[in-house]
Amino acid sequence: MNGLPILSIMIAVPAIAAMLCLFVGANGARWLALIATLVNLALGAALWTNFDVGGPQWQFVEHAQIPAFGTFGWALGIDGFALMLIMLSVFLMPICIGASWTAITKRVPEYMAAFLVTETLMIGTFAAQDMFLFYIFFEAGLIPMYLIIGIWGGANRIYASYKFFLYTLLGSVLMLVAMLWMANYAGTTDIPTLLTTDFPREAQFWLWLGFFASFAVKMPMWPVHTWLPDAHVQAPTAGSVILAGVLLKLGGYGFLRFSVPMFPEASASFTWLILGLSAVAVIYTSLVALVQSDMKKLIAYSSVAHMAIVTIGLFAFNQQGIEGAMIVMLSHGLVSAALFLCVGVIYDRLHTREITRYGGLSINMPRYAILFLLFTMASVGLPGTSGFVGEFLSLAGTYQVSTVATLLCTTGIILGAGYMLYLYRRVAFGEIVHDDVRAMPDLSMREMALLVPIAAAVMWMGVYPESFLAPMRGDAATLVARVSRAQPAGDSLPTPGRPAPVAAPIAAHAEAH
């Protein structure tokens, strides 16, 4: 980009717009937020088109040292993983603003400012190359979401916002302690340097647990997932979209950026824990989703099950698993965001999320029924949609480590089909029992403009995943080469007639690709 500090600009645009929002009226704030998020989407597109696939690992690097703070400084730069997650953030944010256009009527300037600040902090988290800068962005992201749930949420919003804040903050204190020790040991807070630093084996275990405490809550992993259904149910529609779409991915990105490459021996030792918790999460939360009467709660529990597919892929220690985990994160970001928008559409008309109040919507809302069906099928993992590609790769990678964990987690696809198709049948088919449901109009042009781009992205990722995999392939290979010396002791047996895989060829294979 000819020396243009594009990452700093992408952080500055929503930050400046957020401040300006506070000085204009409700309508001005809406337009200002929409324009700022569309500008960032255009900058994100420029970032993607100028990203050199197969080039250096870190691109668009910016450094500005702050002498008063020692090694700490303004350091930004992205690899393929960060690029894809930044693109997810800037893609969903204009959709969130559009979803709030008529739904939010009180304190609109503050609401729009909160969303713009959220975008600023999400981009900063993914682009940060300094460990403490990452921590500041990572933790500050709590504050606007806490306000969005607490001020514009449902009837029980205060309880949900406090629970969300306290859960996520508690784990992060342990992560900060681990970061301070690492900075003291390595003498630097530069993330690319720390990625090649070999920490003592005995220290790795404690450091890994410190980071795990924070990332497991953010994912969220079972059993520290209980804040998520409450937060989703009470959050406004756009709040749920950005919470499921991007904020849950911060935990996965943390595992990818810190836990696995910085503490490979500890990660290998704790793989059994990750696989065990993920298997429980998939089965337990899927069964809980089956008995939900509230649409948002059902989709929230499905998010926990999908995030468990991410964690097993990340800790498979191979190319397929890591690439699959990233695709699941991107796919879930799109699909769950779209599902929450679909719930928001009918909630705006009838002001209830009870599944039993609906039925037969395919008769009087055919456009809605078709789009809702596409996102339902993508959530289930139908071939040809984004959900299939990620789940297949992640489970194929995990199969090389543990056949038992793969078998248990694959049941999540069957259970997922159960609760999602149950939801769709109850809402879209059957007789229209209530007259107020018969009077519900189909999607407006504004609602179509929100859902159709996500539908196109879901199909694009399902039909041609290479455009999303290519920027990440080199980074996944680098990560596999880094952790190949600490392969987890799995229960997978070699195929009869074929030699058992060993660590060295895996690393060599990764480098070859």
Image: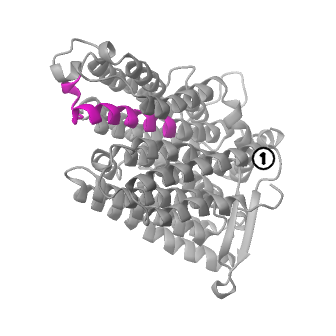
Mark 1 secondary-structure assignment: helix
**In what quadrant of the picture does the C terminus appear?**
top right
Q: What's the amino acid at mark 1? A: Asn
Residue drawn at x 34%, y 33% is 345
Residue 408 visible (yes or no): no
Q: Is residue 347 magenta?
A: yes
Residue drawn at x 19%, y 26% is 357
Camera-side residue of 203 and 175:
175
Camera-side residue of 338 and 450:
450
What number of labels is visible?
1
Give the overall secondary structure of the magenta segment: helix
Residue 154, given in percent of the width and then of the height, sits at 24, 49
Local packing at callout 1 (Cα closer than 10 Å; few below 14, some 14-19, many 20+) is: few
457 relative to 233 in the view: left or right: right
Residue 502, given in percent of the width and then of the height, sits at 72, 40
Residue 105 visible (yes or no): yes
Residue 205, given in percent of the width and then of the height, sits at 54, 64
Which residue range is magenta in the image? Answer: 332-358
Camera-side residue of 381 and 441:
441
What residue would you read off at disc 1? Answer: 50
Camera-side residue of 429 and 405:
429
Q: What colour-coding does the image apply?
A: one colour
| Residue 113 vertical placement versus 367 (above, below) | below
Q: Is residue 111 magenta?
A: no
